[in-house]
Image (cartoon, rainbow, N blue to C red):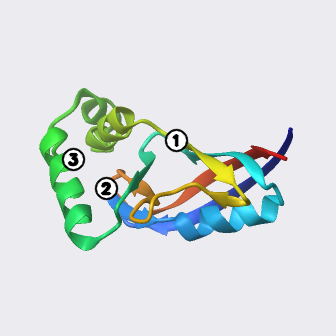
């Protein structure tokens, strides 16, 4: 088994903006040259999450609404009181969703359903360049 690693960067607005990164994942899978294996997708930072969803406008809005219900952006947090950055909600959202995912690689392509896209959630309270570390293990 060999390893191919790459870091990519995605510019993203904050407040749980959801960005489709499936194309980037497919490109890195192809660059690896592996026909089968696993690709691990990990956001660098404590206020982002990687997941899969059906990336369509209604579900994107539903997801943002549910995250706002779970950890409202205007909720006072001890983290915000301590550090003065008012992003305690973003840490809670990222922690509850979990950081990264692993996707199987078969015949050189990520194994995803027809309506399944890989996305990054930028939960922070500001726009930023989100760094994503991709590691493909395969042969």
**In the rendered structure, are the residues bearing label 1 and label 3 in contact, judged by CB atoms less than 8 Å apart?**
no
SS assignment at label 2: loop
Distance (Cα) linking label 2 and label 1: 15 Å
**Residue 73 can be seen, yes or no:** no
Residue 73 in the image: x percent, y percent?
19, 48
In the rendered image, the vertical position of residue 70 relative to residue 120, given as above or below: above
Front in this rendered view, residue 121 or 127: 121
Up-down relation of residue 98 to residue 41 (above or below): above
Identify the residue at horizontal 80%, vertical 58% (top origin): 32
Residues at circles 2 and 3 in contact by the CB criterion of under 8 Å: yes
Q: Secondary structure at mark 3?
A: helix
Quadrant of residue 37 in the image?
top right
Q: Which residue is mark 1?
A: 100
Q: Position of residue 131 (x, y in %)?
A: 59, 55
Are circles 2 and 1 on residues that touch, CB within 8 Å? no
Give whichever of discs 1 and 3 has the lower sequence position: 3
Point out residue 137 in the picture as x, y percentages from the top left corner. Answer: 77, 43
Label 2 and label 3: CA atoms lie apart by 8 Å
**Where, quadrant-wise, is the N terminus in this rendering?**
top right
Q: In the rendering, which numbered label is found on residue 16? A: 2
Quadrant position of residue 65: bottom left
User: Left of 103 or right of it: where is 98?
Assistant: left
At a point 36% along the width and 38% down the height, the residue shown is 97
Question: 136 left or right of 46?
Answer: right
| Foreground pick, 120 / 52 | 52
Callout 3: 10 Å neighbours few (<14), some, many (20+)?
many
Judge the density around disc 2: few (<14), some (14-19), many (≥20) Cα neighbours within 10 Å.
Answer: many
Residue identifier under label 3: 67
Residue 85: x and y, percent? 33, 44
58 and 45: which is toward the camera: 58
Question: Which of the pair 11/24 is nearer the observer?
Answer: 24
């Amino acid at each position: 088994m060999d390893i191919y690693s790459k870091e990519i960067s995605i510019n993203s607005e904050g407040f749980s903006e959801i960005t489709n990164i499936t194309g980037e994942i497919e490109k890195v899978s192809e660059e690896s040259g592996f026909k089968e294996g696993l690709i691990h997708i990990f956001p660098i930072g404590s206020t982002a999450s990687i997941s899969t969803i059906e990336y369509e406008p209604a579900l994107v809005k539903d997801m943002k609404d549910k995250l706002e219900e779970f950890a409202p952006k205007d909720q006072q947090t001890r983290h915000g009181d301590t550090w003065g950055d008012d992003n305690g909600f973003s840490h809670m959202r990222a922690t509850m969703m979990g950081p990264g995912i692993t996707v199987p690689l078969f015949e050189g392509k990520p194994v995803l359903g027809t309506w399944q896209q890989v996305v990054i959630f930028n939960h922070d309270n500001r726009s930023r360049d989100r760094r994503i570390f991709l590691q493909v293990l395969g042969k």
